[in-house]
Structures are given as C-alpha cells and as structure tokens.
Amino acid sequence: MIDLKALRENPAKFKEGAALKKMPVDIDRALALDEQRRALQTRRQALAGEQGQLEKSVGPLLGKLNGELKKATDPAQRAALEAQVAELRAKPAALKAQVQELEVQEKAVEPELTALMLTIPQPPDADVPRGQGSDDNVQLRTWAPAAGAVVTGGWDFAKSFKANRGFAPRTHIDLCGRLGLVDFPRGVKMSGTRSYVLAGDGMLLHQAVLRYAMDFMVRRNGFVPMSVPVLVREECMIGTGFFPAGREQAYMINERARADADVAGSAGGGADAKAAGHDLFLTGTGEVGLMGLHEGEILDEAQLPLKYVTVSPCFRREAGAAGKDTAGLYRVHVFDKVEQVIICRADEAESRRWHKEMLGYVDALLQSLGLPYRLLQCCTADLGVKNADMVDVECWMPGRGEVDADGVPSGGFGETHSASRLYDYQCRRLNMRYRAGGEAGKGAPVVCHSLNNTVAASPRLLIPILEMYQNADGTVTVPEVLREYMGGKTQIG
C-alpha cells in the first residue's frame, strides 16, 4: 500500500506510476474520499472537544440547580428549575449524538477508500526502463561457463547446442520419459492438467536442488531458515500485496461457508462456531509466510536486517496462461521453492544494495551449478503492482525455442528467478515497523522496507539441469555440487 500522505502531496507521481504500469485506478476518487473523511474527522473532533468542555462547565451548574431543586417547595419554581436542568443535560447529549452520527459517516467512507488504496500500484523507480510489456524488458548481462569448465564444459550462446556439445539435444520431457524421472500421465490422472509425479532419480534430483539451495543460503550467506504456513488467511494475502491484484491465481478453501453450514446443521453450534469460519488461501510463494511473520509488530532497529529463507510448496492456478509453456515441468500448479526475504531499514540506498546482494546470491548459485543464464531488467509495464523494481533471472534451456525440420529445438531462455525491490509497500500493508534510534520504546516507529528473490524453484530448475547436463547416450550427468545430496551418484541413466 502506498503512503496516503505521499499521495496527497504528489498525486501526479502516482497517476504517472499507474499509467506506466498500465494499471487503471481512480486516484482522484481516492483523494476525494480522503478529503471527505478528513473533513468529517475534523468536524467530529471539534464537536467532541466542545462536548467535553460543555460537560465540564455544565457539571457545577447542574449541581447548583439540583441543590436548589431539593430546597424548592413552590410548584412553579420547581418546574422552572427542572426545565433548566433538562435543558443543560440536553446540550451535551445533542452534541454526543452529532459526534456519533459523524463517526458513522466517517466509517462509511472507509471501505471504498481502503479498496481504492489497495489497488494503487507502487510507482516504478525512475531508472526502470519504460515499456509496454515483457517484450520491452532489457537484457543486463549473461553468464556461461568458460571453455574447459569442469563437468559441463564451456558454453557459447552464439552457437547451437549441437555446435557446443557435438550432438542434438533432447528436451526435458523426452529425458524424463526415457529415464523414468517424471510420470506425467499418472499425475494428470489424479489431479488434471499441469500435474506430474516425480519418480526415482527425478525425485532425488528435485530434493537435492532444494536442499543444496537451502544450505547455500544458510551456511554460506547467513540467512535464518524458517518454516512458514502455506495456508493463510485473506489478510495475509492482502498484506503482502498478492490481493486484490492476483486473486485469480490463488486457490481458496471456503471455510467460512463450511462453518456457516455446520452452524445451520447443528442446533448446538452457536455463535462461536460461526465466528471460527474464515476463508483460507494456498500461497503461491514462501514470501507470503515470511513477510507475515512480523505483521503488526514494531521491531528494534538493531534487529535489522532480517534475512529469512524458507522452502515450501507453492500453489498457482496459472489462470490465463496458455501456449507451449504448459507442457512438461515449466508451468505447473504445484511446485517447491526456496525463497529469500530481507526486511531492512527504510533507506532507498540500503534497499538497492540488498537488491544487488540478492541477485549476487543467485549468480553464485547458478554459477556453482554451471548453468548459463541472463539477467533481465523488467520494464515498467512488467513490474507488477507492488514492485518499484524487478530483475528476472532466466536460465538457458536447450529444449525451448523454435523447432527445425528435424525436430530439434533452437533453445531459449526461461525464467527461473525474480528479484523484487518493494520499499515500504508490503510493510505498510502489514503494519510492520521499527523504532529508529535503537532501544525499544524510544524513537518514532518507521515503516520497514522489504525485498524478495527466488533461490531455487523446482521442478522448473530441473529443466536446465537435465537439458544442459545431458549426454549423447541419453544419460544425464549429476552436477558436482548436487552429488552429495544424491548419495554420491554421478550419473542418471
């Protein structure tokens, strides 16, 4: 969520940001509602102050009149005193009623204003290239193992796979079938399209990638390993910026309706059973759970930065996704991912530094695996609602691209990682702050900054591993760094 104060001070910045991200949102309406709410609040507070002052001044007068009323014996005098008492009591009561009415009006504005604020995207940073979509993303740099590299050998992007390796490549789908690594038909039988069953060495390789990535972040880079829920309340999805945008990609478990049905079907259910029902959502990334850990908390500045890593199953409906990416392991509904999150001080320079650090971790990981890749700077229209900047990492996958007359694919890049810089966007929604200046209880609370990046998502990362490490005889060499996680196995097949 963006800072409402910043929106008031510079609405043009947010209008331009929404336009650059191609996200229509009625910012003028949000500002009008904010102005209306503040006017009601100002009037309510003024009347509440007036009510308080009146009650203070009325008290002694009422005491005096009530004393006179006790002594009065003349009916006319008593009636006059009673009228004065009633009038004095009516004034603060009338003001109280006005205050309550203004409070009702103020609360009535909140839902629409909140809904609009949740849709206003974070403006892209000024140095993010402008563009109309993913085709306008900019390649920053590439990396490939040098000639003579151990196990994989060198790689030249200018040459075909056959020119680099001396034989035509098989796709990961072909390799998985030949080597019995993945059972697609049985996965589809049980769960429908984009489902799979990892089998034998396929499952071992999958687990090896995840375990290696986790150890890489914890042992080499000092991240704290965490286990987080993958089934969360709607508030957590909203707080992390995945709702309302992206809601169509999430799987929902309708617990509220089930609780209502249980109450309706049970005479002894009562209000407590109904109140317990709330919808739950399966998360599409461990980022949701990691960021939700400190929702509503005020941290000490000395605790920052928090460097968390988790491995978790991820669930995505992939609504609207179509094309050849739906075949094989590239775009599936359920996968596992090692995810890194950093929560740091509210300083742009520090956020930018951590963004580079995160990408550096991925550089080191992929280079240790010997996988050719590139960094792709996402343009403004490809950032998503919550990111000020985002860099995708794409591995070279020989099985992608156009197929020639002999059925041999040309190869192509496929996204495997995405590193995002969010500043205070998520933390503001989550009300996650820290006290500047050190000691708890001192210093004004400041909204934290957050960043996130994939460490390894599998089985997608299996695609470049299988295709780049395949041999002419159809076997696959196990990357050296993964061998200890596969019981010393050096080759599959």
Image (cartoon, helix red, strand yellow):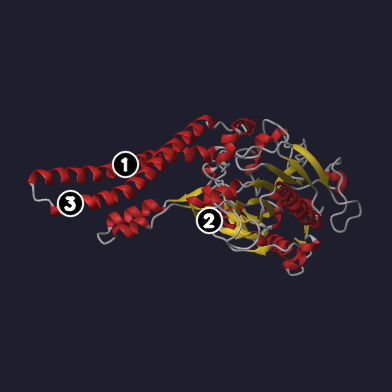
Point out the frontmost of discs 3 and 1.
3
Q: Is residue 346 above or below residue 99?
A: below
**Labels 2 and 3: the sequence-earlier one:** 3
**SS at mark 3?**
helix
Contact (Cβ within 8 Å) of mark 2 with mark 1: no
Q: Residues within 10 Å of mark 3 (few under 14, many from 20)?
A: some
Q: Quadrant of the N terminus?
A: top right
**Labels 3 and 1: the sequence-earlier one:** 3
Per the model, the C-alpha gap separating discs 2 and 1 is 35 Å
**Three-letter amino acid code of the residue under disc 1:** Leu
Q: Quadrant of the C terminus?
A: bottom right
* Residue furthest out toward the right: 148
Q: Residues within 10 Å of mark 1 (few under 14, many from 20)?
A: some
Question: Residue 14: x and y, percent?
Answer: 61, 34
Query: Where does label 2 land, which residue?
Result: 296
Point out the frontmost of discs 2 and 3.
3
At x 91%, y 54%, the residue is 148
**Three-letter amino acid code of the residue under disc 3:** Glu
Which residue occupies the foreground of this view, 49 or 241?
A: 49
**SS at mark 2?**
loop
Query: Where does label 3 land, which residue?
Result: 68
**Labels 2 and 1: the sequence-earlier one:** 1
Which residue occupies the foreground of this view, 371 or 435?
A: 435
Question: Residue 293: x and y, percent?
Answer: 56, 59
**SS at mark 1?**
helix
Query: Where does label 1 land, which residue?
Result: 95
Q: Residues within 10 Å of mark 2 (few under 14, many from 20)?
A: some
Question: Residue 273: x and y, percent?
Answer: 34, 59
**Three-letter amino acid code of the residue under disc 2:** Gly
Q: In the rendering, which numbered label is found on residue 19? A: none
